Amino acid sequence: RKIRVISLTYYLVIYLVLLGLNTPIKQHAFQSNTNNTLIQTNYYAPWCGHCKALAPEYAKAAGMLKAESTDIRLAKVDATEESELAQEFGVRGYPTIKFFKGGEKENPKEYSAGRQADDIVNWLKKRTGPAATTLSDVTQAESLIADNEVAVIGFFKDVESEDAKVFIKTAEAVDDIPFGIVSNDAVFSKFEVAKDGVVLFKKFDEGRNTFDGEISKENLLNFIKANQLPLVIEFTEQTAPKIFGGEIKSHILMFVPKTATDFQEKMDQFKKASEGFKGKILFIFIDSDVDDNQRILEFFGLKKEECPAIRLITLEEEMTKYKPENSEITAENIITFCTDFTEGKLKPHLMSQDIPEDWDKNPVKVLVGKNFEEVAFDPAKNVFVEFYAPWCGHCKQLAPIWDQLGEKFKDKANIVVAKMDSTVNEIEAVKVHSFPTLKFFPAGDDRKVIDYNGERTLDGFTKFLESGGKEGGAPAGDEDEESIFLQNKPLQGDQDYTIIFHLSCTHLPDKKIERKILI
């Protein structure tokens, strides 16, 4: 089995906190509790760090709902104790939040917003009330704006107009932002709105953005997505869902310690550069002094002493990283870097260790990014490579067998048994999606690659090599559908599978893993 490694999927558990009391529910009580009209449920694990971080915000949300005398119920289930409930509702990670409506257990709605109390409450209100709140006077409009980081208000003289109906449809499609709709002349006047339209109010940057264009659901959604986040956003556990759950899949990251004397100067340059790429590239800064952020630095091949630094990553099917040629952080340099990226002029940045002096001294050869092409695609050699991670438990179990294989074939001039640490070495020809990954590069000029899918035994490997990669092999690309990508360090613990988020992490049980968000 492989360690499945994921780049930033947000798995949210089912929390049930009845009437804001944060009371655990047992399996025998679950049926009667879900008979409530509206109930939000959560499976958690006591050891899960993300569950612990979410707990106070979840309890706060429960208190807010209780104070408003809503019909919404919240409670929690310890999935390590109530494993049958966790299995029944497909819980594969912690925390996972789902919403049950009208006593229907078959198709609960999965929670998809942030991990702050306001996010939870706003999401639930969207699920249980009108998509857009009717604002009858100035006070109500001002309250909506004051109580939320971001709010969207539709100004329509006739709330039954076609444009107003499109606005409501748009509101129904957005989970994490409150919407209001108003027809009152006094509200129009207060906010200096002269005609029907849509305004996004926010507590950062410009303060408000007015939609300008043809009102359609697609146009309004694009307008909201482009303006709902700050020009520059700090990465934290709280902001991660908004950063990686958004539509913008190109992210530029500035790694800088907040304690640096020139921190504000760097931020000013970064923000100035961001203005021209709004809606195209998300500008994120990461405090390089924070311990939890060290995993991110390692993922980009950076060390604390190398910060401040800039990197860019695309979060498509395959993540691709880019490094600027000029390391000086100025608005001009960042603009040039981003412009070259948008115009397709940049080459990916691939990490590599230096070639060890003794890389070929042992039966198992040591490959790095800088010597991989020369060795693996040698037309005179059949090369069998293990792509591993130093921390991977399954890789450690495989190591003595791999050494035996190298010893067995060390005198075969046309066979090379090799290994490469894929957490610090990257190559364009091979995308490693899980650890360990075994690939065979047969002799010849056609640069063929064969995945090994046979038994991980000395006998299985031997038959594979002696058959020229035919016994136990498959064409490259036939990946296990459960294998997902990321190179990073594991959490402490003895769980069989360690799942590492690109910028966050959790453990998943030994079940099929679904890719929710790839970053």
Image (cartoon, rainbow, N blue to C red):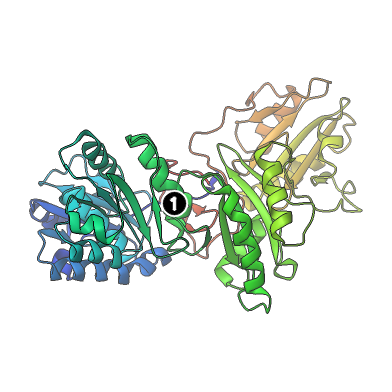
Q: Going by the image, does 5 lie left or right of 358?
A: left
Viewer can see residue 203 = yes
Figure check: 485 above or below 492 = above
Q: What residue is pinned by disc 1?
A: 227
Place residue 377 in its image quadrant: top right
Viewer can see residue 82 = no
Q: Position of residue 78 (x, y in %)?
A: 27, 62
Element class at badge 1: helix
Q: Position of residue 480 (x, y in %)?
A: 52, 33
Q: Going by the image, does 71 lie left or right of 359?
A: left
Mark count: 1
Which of these two is toward me, 163 or 309? 163
- The residue sitting at 11% across, 58% down in the picture is 29
Figure check: 367 above or below 70 = above
Place residue 157 in its image quadrant: top left
Q: Position of residue 467 (x, y in %)?
A: 73, 22
Which of these two is toward me, 442 or 66? 66
- The residue sitting at 28% across, 46% down in the picture is 195
Decide: few, some or many residues near mark 1? Use Cα within 10 Å; few <14, some 14-19, many ≥20. Answer: many
Which of these two is toward me, 490 or 104? 104
Q: Position of residue 489 (x, y in %)?
A: 60, 59
- The residue sitting at 58% across, 71% down in the picture is 291
Question: What amino acid is at disc 1?
Answer: Asn
- The residue sitting at 22% across, 55% down in the picture is 124
